[in-house]
Amino acid sequence: MAELSEVLKGLPPVNDPRLLVGTNTADDAGVYKLSDDLAIIQTVDFFPPTLDDPFTYGQVAAANSLSDVYAMGGTPVTVLNVVGWPSGTFPLNVLTDILRGGQDKVTEAGAVVAGGHTCVDRELKYGLSVTGVIHPDKILTNAGAKAGDRIILTKPLGIGVITTALKLGRVNDELAKKVGSVMITLNKKAAEIMKQFRIHAVTDVTGFGLMGHLHEMMLYSGMHARLFFKQIPILPEAYDFTGPETVPGGTKKNMSFLEPNVVLSQDIREEENILIHDAQTSGGLLICVDHDDAADLMANLHADGVGQASLIGQVLEGEAGKIYVEL
């Protein structure tokens, strides 16, 4: 986080008034206004395999990339495949399966694959560049949270430690399938439901973990948050993988970077602290909703199949960026 901020500070500012969302608030995607009633959302993401099965890996990578558009309140329309291919390492049918997995999720999202680009790399990587559309007056960002908002998380945590354990051969097939199912689930349904309510800020939870993305949301909103740990959805198996060998490097970096801004109650255990900082892949939406709409939004999410969504905390005035976590 800190390194990226320093890099961006060294770039010349973009002053085009048509750029409605840029890099100044660490949002999920850029938004550019084409007309009074149409703006495009642009994002790109790619990463090495998180699962052994190529088709499922392609699904995960696509779902993760598409999520940025959903977090802005938009609709994905076209995508480009982005591939880093280690020539001679895998048979070509592996790449075919990865691309089929990606296309499966793109089709589910109602978008189309318009092409892509492949380069030779020492490590396999795959993801998407996604273009979405939205009305300029309906853009959702991570910077609009208001005092009194309730905070909702739509997917469980624990993906990072479990997928790290998977790479070490410590995860059985049943758990691998379970965590894969979480990652390949699109945030489309949650995004469609939330737009029916007074939503003030949204982001998706990925590499910076719950704490990192919530910290950014509170920082740019000028607010702070209070979370209730027992209400945070976590894959129960994740507790088995909070030892030093299975905690991802990204999770450790999150904990170190965020320590000045996260205040834990004394009854929060170390493994619980690890999991709320855990670096996620294709995690859920983190939503700040008007307090009067929170119960109805939760009811609608649960009724329409987003069953693991949970109301995890509230937004409070002052102390921009701080997060207090109670048991």
Image: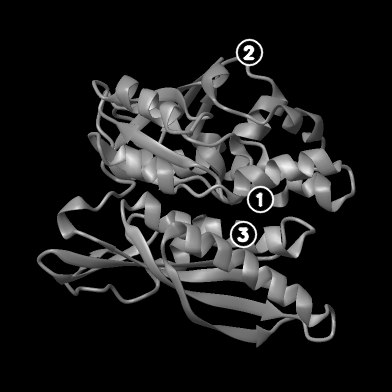
Image: 294 above or below 206: above
On the rendered structure, is 236 left or right of 231? right
- Amino acid bearing label 1: Gly
Q: How busy is the neighbourhood of tag 2: few (under 14 within 10 Å), some, or many (20 plus)?
A: few
Q: Earlier in the sequence, mark 2 or mark 3?
A: 3
Question: Which secondary structure, mark 2?
Answer: loop
Q: Is residue 204 visible?
A: yes
User: Seen from this angle, which residue lies furthest left?
Assistant: 36
Residue 315: % across, % down: 33, 27
Question: Which secondary structure, mark 3?
Answer: helix
Residue 218: % across, % down: 36, 38
Task: Check residue 59 in the rendering and tell me which mark sits there, or answer none.
Answer: 3
- Amino acid bearing label 2: Asp
- What residue is drawn where x is 44% and y is 60%? 5
Residue 82: % across, % down: 57, 76
- Amino acid bearing label 3: Gln
Task: Check residue 250 in the rendering and tell me which mark sits there, or answer none.
Answer: 1
